[in-house]
Image (cartoon, helix red, strand yellow):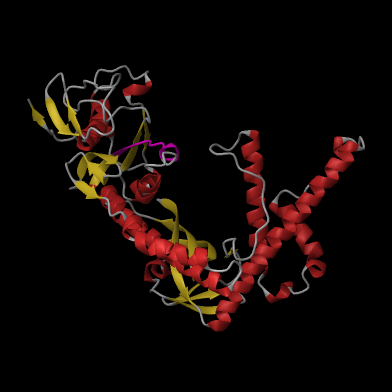
Amino acid sequence: MKTMQAYRFALDPNDAQLAGLRRHAGAARFAYNWGLALVKAALAQRDAEKSYGIDSDQLTPVPWTLPVLRRAWNAAKDDAASWWAECSKEAYSAGLDQLARALKNFGDSRNGKRKGRRVGFARFKKRGRARDSFRYTTGAYGPADDLHVKLPRIGRVKVHEPMGALTGRLADGRARLLGATVSRTAGRWYVSFTVDADREIPAQPGRGGVVGVDLGVRHLAVLSTGERIANPKHARRSERRLRRASRAYARAKPGSAGRRKRAAALGRIHARVANQRRDGLHTLTTRLAKNHDVIVVEDLHVAGMVRNRRLARAVSDVAMAEVRRQLDYKTRWYGSTLVVADRWYPSSKTCSGCGWRNPSLPLSDRTFTCQSCGLVADRDRNAAVNLANLVAASTSETENARGVDQRTPLAGQVAVKQEPGTATAGQTRGAPPLGEAA
């Protein structure tokens, strides 16, 4: 199976290479700002020409796409930046590419082609605030060996960990380099290689069938099998350090070297929390994708959940959207199937034994009690079993799921994402029983 995959490694540059990395990031930022100034000047000229009554086909063209921006830069670079030869041409191309993507996203959002939150017009990047990054797509870049990478105009840079997983695939032809992005996060430089890889879907004869996954704040995840994944609460565990570093940053004089030093210290704490959270989620999602044929999750409205000031911090610490993103591609990697239940499917308010619903069940009530069959079960476990049963029922009844009309949103309309070679719906098993009957 062909798939796009990224490998990220932390760099360990010497002083000269560190200066080169900063210089290239600055070059990308300069090209971005130069191109944005050109676009704004063209837009202002067009507005002036419109006020003079000039026909639309005779208005000044706006350099909106990457090829046009590149031609304009090549024509003006000797005057605009006489020092441009000190950096690789890829750095300037990366900055212009970032601008072209920002302009396209703005245009697509305004025209309704892009879904989600409206995208604003591109803004200038300021040194020290904008993320330092640049990208290579051509040239002699890539792994030099298991412990070094080649970056044009910067040199042979050491990495912190062996790259055998990547170099092995490149050596035997199972992967092909598409690009390399160099970026700085919390004071540390990283290189991310994007590759076009051939992945073999492994045979998993002994893995489980359907598993429902109920994501939450109290527990990171509750599975229909009864397993509970504890919420590690990485941000809360680092709260004292974050608070202390935030106060030190706030007390420092704006613009001073001390403030920059404290900002870097605060950023390192945030980066450590993010790395801990990411590592835990990768462990969970890999295990689910490897050990189950079908994984069922809810289409949670995370953006709406974080608007609740009482839940915002806890929801952000769990990173529910990241769980679904990882499951989306890992189920394709390992030959399983991801099913996303409709956002309005009442998994927490429906009895997993008989289908009776309690529409008035408050969020504070952590136990589900069925007034029809007498089932008493943990709220989260009941929801996870309902998610698993949703798929099991849809495989046994072609028209109705659990005898409920699927034309209504509350019937649990699902979007199944399945790749060739994955388990079919008829091969899945339902969730085990739970709870106690009164």
Q: Is residue 304 left or right of residue 130?
A: left
What is the total number of numbered labels drawn onto the structure image?
0
Q: Is residue 429 left or right of residue 175?
A: left
Residue found 65% across the figure and 34% down from its top: 111
Which of these two is toward me, 313 or 188? 313
Q: Is residue 337 left or right of residue 251?
A: left
Residue found 53% across the figure and 75% down from its top: 150
Q: Is residue 12 magenta?
A: no
Q: Position of residue 40 (x, y in %)?
A: 77, 50
Q: Is residue 405 left or right of residue 172?
A: left
Q: Quadrant for residue 75, please give it.
A: bottom right
Against 402, residue 105 (above or below) is: below
Q: Position of residue 142 (x, y in %)?
A: 51, 70
Which of these two is toward me, 72 or 215? 215
Q: Position of residue 28 (x, y in %)?
A: 65, 64
Q: Is residue 299 magenta?
A: yes
User: Is residue 144 at least partly visible in the picture?
Assistant: yes
The magenta stretch spans which residues?
296-305
